[in-house]
Structure formats: structure tokens, C-alpha cells
Amino acid sequence: MDNVIRRRTPAARLGRIAVYAVLLLAALFYLLPLVVMLITSFKPLHEISPGTLLSLPQSPTVEPWVKAWGEACTGMRCEGIGGYFFNSIAIVVPAVLISTVIGALNGYALTKWRFKGSELLFALMLFGCFIPFQVVLLPMAQTLGWLGLSSSRAGLILVHVIFGIAFTTLFFRNFYVAVPTELVSAAKLDGAGFFRIFWRILLPVSAPIIVVSVIWQFTQIWNDFLFGVAFSAHNTQPVTVALNNLVNTSTGTRDYNVDMAAAMIAALPTLLVYVLAGKYFVRGLTAGSVKG
Amino acid sequence: MTIVSHAQERPVRPAARRNAAAHLQDWLPRLVLAPSVAITLFFVYGFMLWTFVLSLTSSRMLPSYDFVGFAQYARLMANDRWWVASTNLVIFGGLFVAICLGIGVMLAILLDQRIRQEGALRTLYLYPMALSFIVTGVVWKWLLNPGLGIQAMVRSWGFESFTFNWIVDPDMAIYTLVLAAVWQASGFVMALFLAGLRGIDDSIIKAAQLDGASLPRTYLRVILPCLRPVMFSAVMILSHIAIKSFDLVVALTGGGPGYATDLPATFMYAHAFTRAQIGLGSASAMLMLGGVLAILIPYLYSELRSRKHG
Amino acid sequence: MPSFKRNCFTATRFPRTGLALATALAASVSLTSAHAAGEVEVLHWWTSGGEARAANVLKDLMEAEGYGWQDFAVAGGGGETAMTVLKSRAMSGNPPSAAQIKGPEIQEWGELGLLGELDDVAEAEGWDQLLPETVADIMRYDGQYVAVPVNVHRVNWLWANPDLLEQVGVEMPTTLDELFAAGEAIREAGFIPLAHGGQAWQDATVFETVLLATGGVEFFQQALVDLDPEALGSEQMVEALETFKRLRGLMDDDMSGRDWNIATSMVINGDAAMQLMGDWAKGEFTAAELTAGEDYLCAAAPGTADAFTFNIDSLAMFRVEGEEHEAQQALARLVLEPTFQEAFNLAKGSIPARPDLDMSEFDVCARQSLEDFQRTADEGGLVPSMAHGMAVRADVQGAIFDVVTNYFNARDMEAEQAAQRMVNAAKAAL
């Protein structure tokens, strides 16, 4: 799009200013909650009062962060959300990796090795994207009990993989559909097998969609609360559950600054992923969903 | 392009080895897919069937199998709160999808005007998608609370008569949900459209401009129609977010004031888990699934159709 | 227009850029596993300041006897989240050793056959003699003890900030008329008369207290415990609903969704004068280091001096085996030990579940509560709280909550209409 506004007439300049104004206003709207969280998390408690959301801390302190990480109380345990942060990591990393690998293989099989009924299978699996998770809580609980995985970290990983593969399969399938089939056909003619073709031809071009899958799954699983609270025991709770407990635990007056710091801690990993890899995310997502 | 035809294209090899290997190759894709399909059948369809069965029972605190026919559906239809929740979903879902699309398209087009610091702006618009309402719920509650948040802040600037008290007003509270949900998802829609715009072939735009079309006209008549697939994906993603909205309600309003901001997802949860009415909750879940189906079938249809010329 | 669509886009390119997967994350720190030898896992939602301190006493007692205590606190929604977790755990066949379950819900869990009995402990400790009959009844399923009471809360309390009352020049109201009059004066002086949080259960708490004041004990029993359709649709119900709605005029506009302890802190800070809330509110006053009778006042809610709506917290025991069973039985015994009863109830604001304890350590509010408990038990003024799940099962309770909170928040609903809905709610939920 090279030849959008070129001429610099006064009217065009005015238009340009208007464009920037709108964009900046929008940026303020999106930023507001985050800024309030950040500012509040560095304020001492006595500086927090009605109507002072946006005033900068007079005497900034990191104490709320220290408290939120290691000292804040939930019930009778005063150990902050730090430990639960690592719980989340221990759940998220395997779940993301496993569901991405499965999704990639599924997407590959569905597009490059079509067989009778494969499209129907895909349609079947796609439905998993849309099932409201409240519906599966009780049956899942019972199934986890049968499998001997209730309240365990492995159980939570399994749940996230199960309800993640629908999405990862969708991503990879839509992406691989656009990869020229000629290459694959040629390789098949040369006698290359299923995994060899995947490894040599598909995988090397998959970077954008792997990023998408990883980011999507990472965000979904890290932010999950419902499964986390329902399928965990006291020692396997993910950080969102700990955050919820912390925020709902109040001693007389609420430590809003600690609440905000805890929320920031819980949000940091996903924020970081979006800021660092957001560019690839958007690019990859459209490479999949917009087929030429 | 079936497996059989590939097998025929293969060069001739020693018969026995070829057969075994080819068989394996033929079945390998199916073997790879099998676990996922089995998982889906059991954990998605099996559980749906299970929920349907429960919706026909008088299950209370935990599932029981005392069948009562469609009585739970009849009760649901007679339940005021269910109708409030369903109406809310229509209002919330409709506004949410429409506003997200509007803002998303507008921001994408504006960002496409060779803006300085585009990357930074894009990240700012996109980041809310990274956060759940479990995380941002507290701050949203705060911002929307008339005594603590935006209203108090603007008043402290000297605008004493400024009011922004939607969250405590039963008629307006649903719009605070829309506001927060738009905040979360509209940047994502922007990103989808921006990437779509970048993928459009320049020659089309040049052609339009050679024809003397103005810039807005070019966008409206030439470029946006090209983005129909993006629009479609966006609508699908947004409607499924709307139907699944749960954390949002719990974190922002808890369904209140009264139950003015209840949605089917929160209705189902409250009845199945808090109120020991698993039968009724399952019936509402089945109706929710019906709603999902109504959206999904056109999507699947288009997905499967588009591959034929994909 | 497939062919046109195709022309819209440049061919997709496949960049070979290496990815920086953001998964270079540290290995997990593993926490120890559940159910080690002689441990109990206790699911509860005693998470606010006073409550958590109170629960800690029990943990210390368990540990002093050599048992382990795994604290499984799930905050939020007045126990709603915790109940979801409990159901999920029960479905998976892996329930905790003990859970905070109360009232008729104990019967429901009992019917499902998931609870273990405590008869050995009960006999050894003489629970039949120790516990008031009303309390003991709730703890038994099918004649056997399956739960142990932790305390007795009184729901119909009025709390007030004495400095504020003095400043405005009003007395602690004892009738609803006095409450409205005092409220007006407080409003004129520029304060919030009644602190309240707009959550369904808080609305219901205020509602049942008002109903008790306007309709009396007998009507309360008929309407909210026996669910008599005639009582639910009666004139008395309409009057109760209208009075309840009038109270809204004494509350502030921003109450929607506010937690109860935030409302209490409004009384503590002097933003609001009074609060209608159960005696767990005292835990917040205590946490703020205030003294009952001096820094804050308590009285039976206006018009309900001769009634006592009770809310009994209890720990129900799930069927478990081996060392966990042993620890669980010890837990049941320790809950009724005087040391715990005293410490827990001092912190929580309630009175001990066993009335034989020395009350000298307790404050005036608690002593009045115990006195009223025994008096109303004799005179027939003791009623279970509907709002706190002591009177009816969860489905009926939820249906009544819906009517109450909807009526309270709707601008244009008539009390008659609400009463009619109440009748329907009770019918539909049966």
C-alpha cells in the first residue's frame, strides 16, 4: 500500500493529525487498566484513596510486590503466590508442547494425506473449540478419578491437552492447507515416508504457525481458572487460583496495592510473550486463517 | 487426491516389501489422527451426551439417573432468570461483536497509513488479549466503581456532575460487560484485519486508484470486500468468546445488580454447582450447545467448502 | 467469488526465520504431595482476616498432637467456588478429609453416602450431652454424627459506630421505625446510614432479618423454613418486602457487588453508621483492634430482640481410610475441645457450639448472643437462617435469592409481584 496519502496538502496534514489523535486516544483506552494496576502496585497503602487512580506514587515502594510474591496470606498460609507461579509453569510448559506437537501432526495428516472421511474427522474435532468448559467439569472430574489423576498436575496437563488439540489442529490444518502440495507429492514419488516428509518439508516452513500455536496455548492455559480450581489440590493450584484466593482474602482493609502487584505477577508471563512475539503471532494467525 | 492414487504413482519395487511399507504408509496418517479422534469422541461428544442424559434426570447435587423426561427444559423455560440471561447474551453478544469489528477495522485502516511507531501501537492494542479477567477483574471493578474509579477521578478534576455509574445500574450494567470485553478483544480483531490488509495485492488498489476512486471509496468498495474471509474468522472467534464469557461476569459484576448481568454460562454454573440443580444446569448447557451449533455449522460449512479451492 | 478472492492476496510466503519460543522456562518447584501419613486435608473458605486466624488455632492443635494439616482454602463467592471444588473432588472419588459443609447440605451429602461416621468420638466425648439438641440434630445423618459443629453464629445483628451515632445525636435503634428515623438523621448529617454490599446473599440476609422483624418468628418459620405457599404469598410477605425495599433508601449508591467486610470497614472508618450483618462482622472489628461495647456497638437487629436466626458452621467428615481416618477422628475431637472452641470463636465473633464453656474471655456481644441463644431456644424464638443455608436446600435457597435480589434491585417491581414469584420459586424448586 504505497500510494495512500502522498500529497501533503493542508487538508491532508489535518487528516494526518486526526489519524494520530484517534490512534493515541485508542492507545490510552487500552492502556488505562494496565497503568492503573502498575501505578497502584507501587503505592504504599495510605496513598490509595478514591479518585486518585492515575496520580503517581509519592513515595514509590516495591513492598507490595515483595508481599505478593512471598508473604501475602491466603487462608492460613502466608506464602504469597510465588510457589503457585512455578506450579503454573510446570503445568503450562508440558501442556503447550504436547498439544502443539499433536496439533502439528494432525494438521499435517489432515491436509497432506487426505483420506476418505478426513474432512469429516476435522469437522468433528473442530467442535472441541467451542464446547463451553463449564459443561465438562463434572464428567472430567469423574474421568480423572478413574484414571487416578484427580487433583494431580498430570491430570491438569491432560485436561489442557485434550481441550487444546482442537485449536492447535485447527491452526496447523489451516496453515498446511496453503503449503503447496506439489512438494509433498514429489517427495512421495521419491518414496519419502510420512514422518520424513513432515520433518523435511513441512516442519521447516512451520515457524509462524508454531509461534501462533504456542502463544495461543500458553495464554489460554496460563490464564485458565476454571479447570485450575476444579481439578487441583491445595498444592497443585495454578497461579490464577492463588491470585483469586489472594484477592478474595482480606484483612479488614483490602491491600489493593498487594492485589495489584499479585495480578501483575500473574500477568507478566503472558504479557511478555505478547510483547516479544506478538508480531509473529498476528502474522502467523493470518497466514493460517486467510487463505489466498 | 486420495491415498490410492498416490500408491499407484509410486515406482515399482519388490512386491512384498512394497506392500507392507505402502500399507503402513497408507495407515500411518490415520494412526496419527486416531488418538485425537478418540479423545474428541470421548471427551467432547461423550461428555455432551452425558450432559444430555443428565438434563433428562432429576439430578441435584451430584449426578443421579432418575429420569424425568424433558421436565428440566420446561422448568428452564419457566425460569425468569434464564430469560434474562438469554436476552443478555443477545444484547451483549451483538454489541460486543459489532463494536469489536467496528473498532478493529477502523484501527487497522488507520494503522495502515504508514504510521510512526506502528509496532508499539499494535502491541498496545493487542496486549489485553493476553490477560484474563481473573487478572484484570480487580482493576476493572475499581475503574467502574462510581465511588473509587473513573467517576470519582473525573469529579476530582472539577467536573462535579460527571456520572459514570453503569455498573450499579441494573439497566446499564450489561454495557459495562460490553465495554470490558471490547477492551479485551478489539485489538485482536484489529490485528487480524491489519494482517489481512497487508496481504492484499497492491495492484488491486492501484487499479482502483487509476479508476479515480477516492481513498474511503477504495477501502469500502475494493479492499474490505477482499477481507471477507478475515471478517468471517473474526466473527466466529468473537461469537465464541461471547458465548463462553464467564470470567468476565464473575470478575466484574458477579451477575449483579440483582441478576441483571447474568449470562447463560454463569446461569449454568450457578445452578449446576452452587444450587445443587445439576439437571437444570445440564438442560441450560444443552441449550447453550445448541446456540454454539447454530454458529458453528455455517463456519464448518465454509471451512470445508473453501478448501476445495484453497 | 472464489476467483476474485484469489486475486486479492499475494502468494503466501513461508519465512524461515528461526523462532524464539518463549518457553525457556525454569524447571518446576514441586510441592509435597497430599495425604501423607496422619494428615487431614481440610477444604474451607475461612479466608478473611479474622476467619483465617481462627482456623489457624485448629491447625496448631492438630500439629501439637502430631497430625498434619493440609490447608485447602478456596476463596470467593461465599463458598461457591469451594463447593465447586468439593463436587469435583467428590466426583473423582478423592474428597478431602473434611470440608466446611453446613445445614441441610449435610443431609444431601449423607444421602449420597459419601460421609463417614463419628459415633466413636461422639460417644467418648459425650456429644449428646454436650451439644444443644438443635445443633446436634443438624450434625447427624440417619442418626449418626457425620459432622462436627464449629460455632453458632447469630445472623440478626445490628452493628454501629458509636462516635458517629453520638455526633448525629441518635440512639441505637431497637425497632424498624427507630431505624428509619435514625437513618434519616444520619443521612442529613452527611453519612451513609446503612453499610451494605449488593450481593445476593447479603440482600437475602437483610431481607430475612426484616421479615423476622415485621412478621415475627412464627411467620418466619412458615414462610422461609416450611415454604408454606400461603405464607409466601401473604400480606405479611408483601409488608416485609416493602419494608426491605425501603431500607434501600438508607444505603449508598455504590454498593453493587461490594464484599461484606468492605461494608464493615465502612462502619469502622466512620463512612457509614450501621450495618445489618451476622456476627462474623465482629471478626473485622476485632482485626481492626476495636473493643465491643466501646469502639463499636452491637444489638439485636431492630425488632428482633426475641428471636435468634442461627447459622452454624460445621466440618463434615468424608469417608476416608487408614491413617487419614485416624487423623480425621482426632480433628473431630479437637474441634469441640474448649481450647479451640474458645480461641476460634473469640476470633470469629460467634459463640461456642457447646454452651458449657466459661464465657469470661468473651466480649459483651458474644455473651449477649449466648444468653439470647439459650433464652430463644426455651421460648421458641430460635430459627434457622434461610440466607445462610440453614433452613432450606440450596436450590430453593437460590430461587428465593433470585426473587429477593431482583426485587431489591429492580426499579419497578411491585411487592405483590415479588411475593407471587416467591411462591412460584418455592414450588418450582421442590
Image: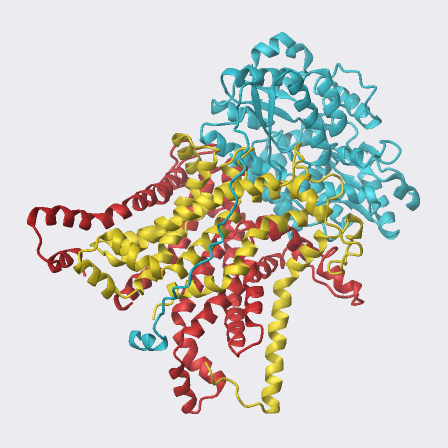
Chain colours: A yellow, B red, C cyan
Which sits in the foreground, B35 or B302?
B35
Residue, far left? B15
Residue A291 in sight in this render: yes
Q: Is residue C39 above or below residue C243?
A: above
Residue that appears at 11% across and 47% down: B17
Left or right: C379 with respect to C75?
A: right
The quarter of the picture where residue A191 lies is bottom left
The quarter of the picture where residue B230 lies is bottom left
Residue that appears at 54% across and 29% down: C32
Q: Position of residue C98 (x, y in %)?
A: 57, 24
Quadrant of the image containing the N terminus of chain A: bottom left
Left or right: B79 with respect to B27?
A: right
Residue C411 in sight in this render: no
Q: Position of residue C193 (x, y in %)?
A: 81, 46
Residue that appears at 77% across and 52% down: A48
Q: Position of residue B118 (x, y in %)?
A: 55, 72
